Image (cartoon, helix red, strand yellow):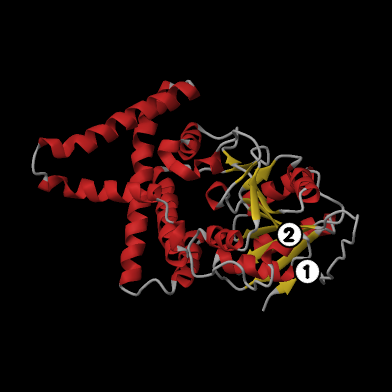
Amino acid sequence: MALVTRPHERRDSGAGSAIALSVVIVTHRRLQLLARCLESVFAAALPADAEVLVVVNGPDPASDGLLRDFAGRDARVLVLSIPATSPAGARNAAMARANGDVVYFLDDDVTIVPDLFARALRVFAERADVGVVGGPNLTPPDSGRFEHCVGRVLESPFGSASVSRRYRRRGGVETVDDRALILCNLAIRRSAFGDLEGPFPEHVVCNEENILLAGLAARGVRMLHDPDLVVYHLRRGTLAGFCRQIFKYGRGRWQNTLVVPDSLSPMFLVPVVFLLYLVSLPLAPGPLYFAPLAAYVALLAAFSIQETLRVRDPRCLPLFMILFPACHLSYATGFLGELVQSVRGRGVRIGERAVRRRDRDAA
């Protein structure tokens, strides 16, 4: 049974009044990260009529205690403790409880810029045709060398192709599709959900926002990307952690494809084709068969040198030479692995496996 620290009452924002805001954060056993996130939220221009709904996803006495302390200091904090479920399931639980006319989703390992909420709410107030607004998640300035290199790989078109916009602050405010938006920094007008109940698909390991946003786009909901709507998102600090993250993204992309086949861009298949090509190299019929490998190595060297010059640290060059192929191959492995699982009929209990894995990793 879910436990809520104070009762909910739906606010009536009324014509001409400020747009009510619900900030939703899902957490589990990440006490220091959560505390840092909440401090940045309350240091921002958070409206007086807002609520900060923190979902504790599974038994977590330490987080419950921290949140009781925050709730004691600020009445806008609402704590929802639920039995362990998938991240999508936890967000669905939050949606069932949230009061805001705008729901702003953050991850518990982000910090935000001071005008994040004010800027997003201004867009919604001025543009009635917009249902979704999001922005980039950037590497925190105080990150170490490895984390900065991970961030550079993610924001590079060579590293993450058509989704690289999620990780860089460039351009202006534009109409976009789900490839430019990410759930750790995403605001959705409640009315955009229409009659959807449990809007996030709970069986997927990630990409739940992409599936939701594709559904909203099919309903004609307009989505914007604002490069100044910034959160700072911690990057993985080890090669193994980075590979696990990208492997999960690959799995999520195939799951996304099963639900929304039209979402599969040819660019998402390039790493998969390259991995299959590498596996076939021992059977190469002749020297020309190695031409694609030579082209990849040339691109790898060029982009690694380019990023090294940008960060002005020659010690980053070998990191880029490792991280770029690690990104491509981890994604392709996750994509192909999930494809095989779905063909074999084993992709139906993904959410439950994700919960068990999360609990094991946290322990």
Instruction: Tell me whether the residue at label 2 lies in contact with that at label 1, contact meaning CB atoms closer than 8 angstroms.
Output: yes
Q: Position of residue 135 (x, y in %)?
A: 63, 44
Q: In the displayed structure, does residue 25 sit left or right of residue 303?
A: right
Q: Residue at x 39, y 71 (%)?
A: 347
The residue drawn where x is 46% and y is 35% is: 156
Camera-side residue of 327 and 162: 162
State left or right for residue 307 relative to residue 140.
Answer: left
- State the residue lying farthest toward the left: 285
- Residue 32 showing in the rendered view: no
What's the mark number on residue 316? none
How far separated are the C-alphas under marks 2 and 1?
A: 10 Å
Image-based side of 335 in relation to 95, left or right: left
Classify mark 1: residues with Cα within 10 Å, few (<14), some (14-19) or many (20+): some
Nearest the eye: 209 or 82 = 209
Expressed as whole percent of the image width and height from the top left, the position of residue 146 reads 46, 35
With respect to residue 360, does 156 lie above or below? above
Measuring 64% from the left and 38% from the top, which residue is drawn there?
227
What residue appears at the point 87 percent right and 61 percent down from the top-left corner? 13
Q: Earlier in the sequence, mark 2 or mark 1?
A: 1
x and y percentages locating residue 329 in the rendered image: 33, 47
Q: Which residue is mark 2?
A: 67
Q: How many marks?
A: 2
Estimate the x, y position of residue 309 in percent, counting from the top left: 45, 21
Residue that badge 1 annotates:
5
Q: Quadrant of the N terminus?
A: bottom right
Three-letter amino acid code at disc 1? Thr
Q: Is residue 67 visible?
A: yes
Looking at the picture, which amino acid does disc 2 mark? Leu
Q: Using the image, determine if residue 277 lies above or below residue 85.
A: above
Crowdedness near tag 2: few (<14), some (14–19) or many (≥20) residues, C-alpha within 10 Å: many
Give the SS element for disc 2.
helix
Q: Nearer the viewer, residue 98 or 38?
A: 98
